[in-house]
Image: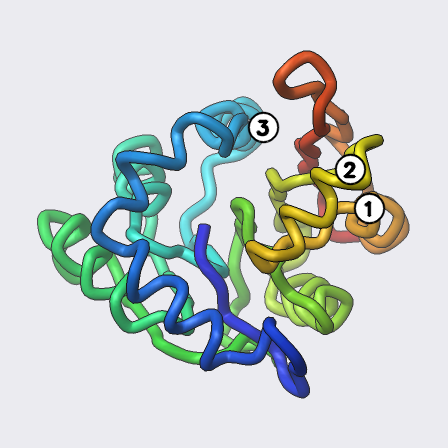
Amino acid sequence: MSVVFLTPPSGPNQPGAIENYYRLHARIYDGTRWSFLFGRAAILAEVAARARPARILEVGCGTGRNLVELGARFPGATLTGVDLSAPMLAVARRKTAALGARVELRQQCYNAPLGVAGGFDLVLFSYALSMFNPGFETAMQAAVADLAPGGRLAVVDFHATRFRWFERWMGVNHVRMNGQLQPLLQTSLTPEVNRVNAAYGGVWQYLTFVGRKK
């Protein structure tokens, strides 16, 4: 997870604030996020149970953790990672170096389809969409447009919490979690996996979703 922020952002979620956040966190990101970014391995397993994608896009690829896993699961696939944070992409380049020319990393916003010929068989958002404030709708629309016919969109992300203090704290960390993602995913794609999971005894929930292009 990292971010490819959409315009026009405002307040604490503007690109400068996000870039500063990840400049500080890039070196420690993978060593700390395991304790609360649940379901990242599970979403890849859900995809693998349903498809063998040949062209894969991860939006908000961060340090490249998922790209490495995707490269191992799908050895014939080409991989594209998009992220706004230069420090996170620097880590991703080191992590994915062994995959060679199979990987392309792009530092850019994701506010329009990439328009790759033939489209992608899989577009993955892993703890990224909840940070697109505003603009998650635009990102989803771009992803659906970037999918090849019958391609799949996979999302694992924060969903909601019943505790206002936790919702406010997550907002300080640039995350919105009031159930905003699931309704649009359900109407934009044909759901194959659509599951809300409890974390830390129900302090918050996270969403696991795989949907096929209609």
| Mark 1–mark 3 distance (CA, rounded to whole Å) | 29 Å
Q: Amino acid at mark 3?
A: Arg
Q: Is residue 57 visible?
A: no
Rendering quarter of residue 62 = bottom left
Give the residue displayed 44% in from the left and 57% down from the top.
2
Give SS at disc 3: loop
In the rendered image, which residue does mark 3 sit on? Answer: 50
Q: Residue 107: horizontal and vertical position, in percent?
A: 35, 76
Q: Seen in the image, is 135 located left or right of residue 147? A: right
Q: Residue 60: horizontal and vertical position, in percent?
A: 47, 59
Give the residue displayed 52% in from the left and 68% down from the top.
118
In the rendered image, which residue does mark 2 sit on? Answer: 160
Q: Seen in the image, is 74 located left or right of residue 122? A: left
The chosen color scheme is rainbow
What label does residue 146 carry, if any? none
Q: Residue furthest front?
A: 165
Q: Seen in the image, is 41 located left or right of residue 187? A: left
Give the residue displayed 41% in from the left and 67% down from the top.
82
Mark 3 touches mark 2? (CB < 8 Å): no
10 Å neighbourhood of mark 2: few (<14), some, or many (≥20)?
A: many
Mark 1 touches mark 3? (CB < 8 Å): no
Q: Is residue 117 above or below residue 143?
A: below
Q: Residue furthest bottom?
A: 8
Q: Seen in the image, is 57 located left or right of residue 62? A: right
Give SS at disc 1: loop
Q: Amino acid at mark 1?
A: Asn
**Residue closest to the eye, 164 or 38:** 164
Q: Nearer the viewer, mark 3 or mark 2?
A: 2
What label does residue 178 carry, if any? 1
Q: Amino acid at mark 2?
A: Ala
